[in-house]
Image: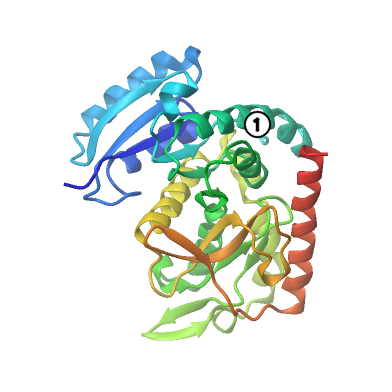
Amino acid sequence: MTEVTRVVVTGAAGQIGYSILQPLALGHAFGLDHPIHIVLFDLPRCEDVMKGVQLELEDLASPVLMGTTIATTSELAFKDADFIICLAGLLVVLENMTRAMAISKNKIIYEAHGKAINEFAKKTCKILVVANPCNSMCLVLSQNAPSIPPQNFSSMSRLDQNRIQSMVATKVGVSTKFVKGVCVWGNHASSMVPDVSHSHVILDGKSIKSKDVITDDAFWKSFTPDVQERAMLVVKYRKNTSALSSAIAAVNHIHDWVCGTPEGYYSSMGVWSDGSYGAPTGVFFSFPCICKDGKWSIVKGLTVCKEIQEKLKITGEDLLQEKKDMFP
């Protein structure tokens, strides 16, 4: 029998936590035949909420959910963890604070979590940071958990990739499964770089470049700002964060990382930069990646146009500035 994977969800009582637990418990992240044990971790004042969610998880009668645990301390939460999904943190878009303020306040949370992960989690543990600013919080976690390789940490940019894929598919009028090769570079911030230059749409069995299929100049002119501003648009109408789409993006991210990237697709992931494509090192930078056997690798050899190169430089400088602000 496959060994049970112990999966910790921090901020489990929150909106994204509630949204992610159902697909997680039903096997959509780690595999439909892979047994998991879910640890719900949040503040002590959230314990009753977690108890209610725990009952709902049991009522799913999922064949892969082997058990649940409620934790209000870091030791209980991270003890022997195999995978940690980090949702905890102040929400920038809802708390009416600047990004710099959010970095300062969330850094305190992630320093503490990093030290606890370093002490209690398995050294093979993988960690996905969803809470924003996710690239920088991923760096804080990694810096405070030196016994775990930086390659085991990743920040989420998959939501932006999903947005791109959906926008292109909707414009063409096809299923998203027929849109391949879209990706996101850099920081999950206003400087992020959505990229369709390597993407294709499958039409009548033929693979055609996205920009050859969509010839509407107005669509492409507003494309990048539309992707960058999508989260704020959700907040404007919903009066809350984009919990559902964030949760599914996290599930997509984990599934590709653990089970492998489907052929012809990229997995946009914030990973420990090796300097590829002129990106700065020493930061978590989103690259187009391919995952296999539980490991990611940056897609090499892509031709990057001058416009994208310039944007990569800007988003890289953005990440370096955030790093400087956190570790002066």
Question: Which residue is labeled 1 in the image?
Answer: 94
Q: Residue at x 46, y 30 (%)?
A: 120
- Is 56 on the left or on the right of 113, as rendered? left
Q: Residue at x 39, y 13 (%)?
A: 48
Q: Residue furthest bottom?
A: 206
Q: How is the image coloured?
A: rainbow
Q: Secondary structure at mark 1?
A: loop
- Is 162 on the left or on the right of 252, as rendered? right
In the depicted structure, whether residue 55 falls above or below residue 121:
above
Q: Nearer the viewer, residue 187 or 233?
A: 187
* Residue 283, horizontal then vertical, whole percent: 68, 52
In the depicted structure, whether residue 309 falls above or below residue 83:
below
Q: In the rendered image, is residue 53 in sight?
A: no
Q: Nearer the viewer, residue 184 or 142?
A: 142
Q: Residue at x 83, y 39 (%)?
A: 328
* Residue 167, horizontal then vertical, whole percent: 54, 63
- Is 153 on the left or on the right of 178, as rendered? right
Q: Residue at x 41, y 22 (%)?
A: 76
Q: In the rendered image, is residue 324 in sight?
A: yes
In the depicted structure, whether residue 265 falls above or below residue 136:
below
